[in-house]
Image (cartoon, rainbow, N blue to C red):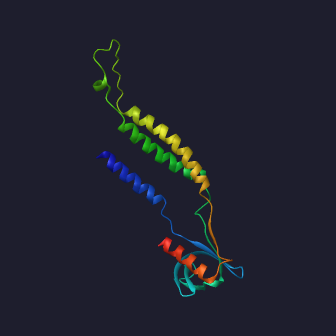
């Protein structure tokens, strides 16, 4: 029962770290850009957007040459390494705890030299946490450093129908 509660708390905490609002930067045909906007609705030949400085604005889709979804913050080795360290330590500790077995029940009474030293599950938990933490730190750091690229949709060479379908797909994916 303890393990189910720990796993549930861990999953809820980890998933809340990744919940973000999606903002876009739109580049128009005449060179202007509109930043920090949310794509709301595609209707007819127009895209409705909303932003921090305005409630709603309608753009003709033929005037859009690029949609860019910036990654929140810079790519971060340290953020990924921190999340990996936490994840690896918890997972390694749980594995260590689950693999502990009492030495008294597994030892044979016919051994000529038997110390019967049992330090309890604590050493398994600590050992598993250390190994998992080091592995999680390394893997999380690599992932964190590689996840910092913006998502760019180049619409400059697309036809009207291609632009419409691409924007519609983006809006549907975000909903």
Question: To which quarter of the image does residue 98 belong?
Answer: top left
Q: Residue furthest top?
A: 112
Where in the figure is residue 59, as x and y percent of width and height? Answer: 60, 85
Is residue 90 rendered to the left or right of residue 74?
A: left
Rendered position, 111 above or below 72: above
What count of labels does the image hold?
Answer: 0
Rendered position, 11 above or below 33: above
Looking at the image, can residue 51 be seen?
Answer: no
Question: To which quarter of the image does residue 12 belong?
Answer: bottom left
Rendered position, 102 above or below 167: above
Residue pictured at 50% horizontal, 65% vertical: 20
Where in the figure is residue 67, as x and y percent of width and height? Answer: 62, 74
Looking at the image, can residue 127 be seen?
Answer: yes
Residue pictured at 53% horizontal, 49% vertical: 82
Front residue of 67 and 79:
67
Where in the figure is residue 49, as x and y percent of width and height? Answer: 55, 80
Is residue 37 rendered to the left or right of residue 33?
A: left
Where in the figure is residue 121, as x and y percent of width and height? Answer: 36, 33
Rendered position, 152 above or below 118: below
């Amino acid at each position: 029962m303890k393990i189910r509660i720990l796993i549930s708390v861990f999953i809820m905490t980890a998933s809340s770290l990744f919940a973000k609002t999606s903002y876009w930067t739109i580049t128009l045909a005449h060179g202007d850009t509109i930043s920090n906007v949310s794509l709301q609705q595609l209707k007819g030949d127009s895209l409705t957007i909303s932003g921090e400085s305005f409630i709603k604005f309608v753009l003709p889709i033929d005037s859009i040459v690029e949609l860019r979804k910036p990654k929140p913050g810079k790519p971060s080795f340290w953020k990924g390494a921190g999340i990996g360290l936490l994840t690896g330590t918890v997972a390694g500790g749980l594995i260590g705890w689950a693999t502990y077995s009492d030495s008294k029940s597994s030892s044979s009474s016919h051994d000529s030299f038997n110390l019967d030293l049992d330090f309890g599950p604590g050493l398994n938990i600590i050992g598993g946490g250390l190994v998992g933490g080091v592995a999680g730190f390394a893997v999380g750091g690599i992932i964190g450093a590689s996840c910092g690229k913006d998502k760019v949709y180049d619409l400059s060479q697309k036809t009207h129908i291609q632009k419409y379908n691409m924007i519609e797909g983006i809006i549907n994916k975000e909903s």
